[in-house]
């Protein structure tokens, strides 16, 4: 059994248990599923089958939210791609990255947590699950994944799994996209269970 399959099996067992075992805290229904960035396309394929099985065998509806799509939607609807290209040409890549970070984090624009919550409206925590996927839209350091989970805390009770491309050192020190210098940049606090941290 591959490490992806093993981690998905562990996740499934925790998602369908009663009570659900993805978190030890009632107000924090989140977990992280860590996988190697090189496994992105294999994981996408497996997740569709995984979601189908959760629905057919356990009556749990999985809602996929593509973080990458939300990032590009915010860029397009706020100041547009042309403006972002202009920023990069005139001020450099870091300035462009900082600009996108402002769009996704400033209350004057479109905080990504608010966009995610809009996608979760009307979900029933007893039946619905949320899979946050395509986190590559946050790379290289456009937005810290840990900030998103912090922002969602106490704003939704829908069980949410953040599919995190990167490497792990220990149980909570995660390195987003295996980028140098990003150790801990994506790690949430110790209360969140990390599937795949041992891989």
Image (tube, helix red, strand yellow):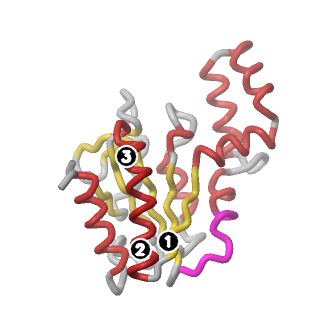
Upstream in sequence: badge 1 or badge 3: 3
Q: Nearer the viewer, residue 124 or 4?
A: 4
Count of number-bearing discs = 3
Instruction: Indicate the quadrant where residue 19 lies.
Output: bottom left
Q: Are marks 1 and 2 in contact (CB under 8 Å)?
A: yes
Q: Is residue 112 magenta?
A: no
**Residue at position x 38%, y 50% in the image:** 43
Is label 1 or label 2 in front? Answer: 2
Q: On the rendered structure, is 117 left or right of 48?
A: right
In the picture, the quarter occupied by the N terminus is bottom left
Is label 1 or label 3 in front? Answer: 3
Upstream in sequence: badge 2 or badge 3: 3
Q: Nearer the viewer, residue 128 or 106?
A: 128
* Residue denoted by label 3: 42
* Residue denoted by label 2: 54
Q: What element carries label 1?
A: strand
* Residue denoted by label 1: 129
- Tell me the distance, in whole angstroms, between the alpha carbons under discs 1 and 2: 10 Å
- Residue 90 x/y as whole percent: 74, 13
Q: On the rendered structure, is 106 left or right of 133?
A: right
- Residue 118 x/y as whole percent: 69, 64
Q: What stretch is highlighted in magenta?
A: 117-125
Q: Nearer the viewer, residue 50 or 23?
A: 50
Q: What element carries label 3?
A: helix
Q: What element carries label 2?
A: helix
């Amino acid at each position: 059994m591959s490490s992806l399959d093993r981690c998905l099996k562990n996740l499934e067992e925790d998602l369908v248990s009663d009570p659900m075992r993805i978190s030890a805290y009632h107000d924090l229904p989140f977990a992280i599923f860590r996988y190697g960035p090189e496994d992105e396309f294999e994981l996408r394929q497996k997740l569709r089958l995984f979601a189908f099985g959760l629905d057919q065998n356990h009556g749990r509806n999985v809602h996929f939210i593509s973080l990458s799509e939300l990032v590009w939607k915010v860029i397009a609807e706020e100041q547009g791609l042309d403006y972002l290209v202009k920023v990069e040409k005139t001020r450099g890549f870091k300035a462009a990255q900082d600009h996108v970070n402002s769009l996704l984090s400033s209350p004057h624009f479109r905080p990504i947590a608010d966009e995610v919550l809009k996608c979760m409206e009307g979900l029933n925590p007893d039946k619905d699950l949320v899979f946050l996927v395509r986190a590559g839209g946050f790379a290289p350091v456009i937005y810290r994944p840990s900030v998103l989970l912090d922002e969602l805390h106490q704003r939704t009770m829908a069980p949410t799994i953040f599919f995190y491309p990167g490497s792990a050192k220990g149980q909570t020190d995660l390195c987003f996209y295996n980028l140098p210098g990003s150790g801990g940049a994506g790690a949430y606090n110790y209360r969140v269970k990390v599937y795949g941290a041992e891989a």
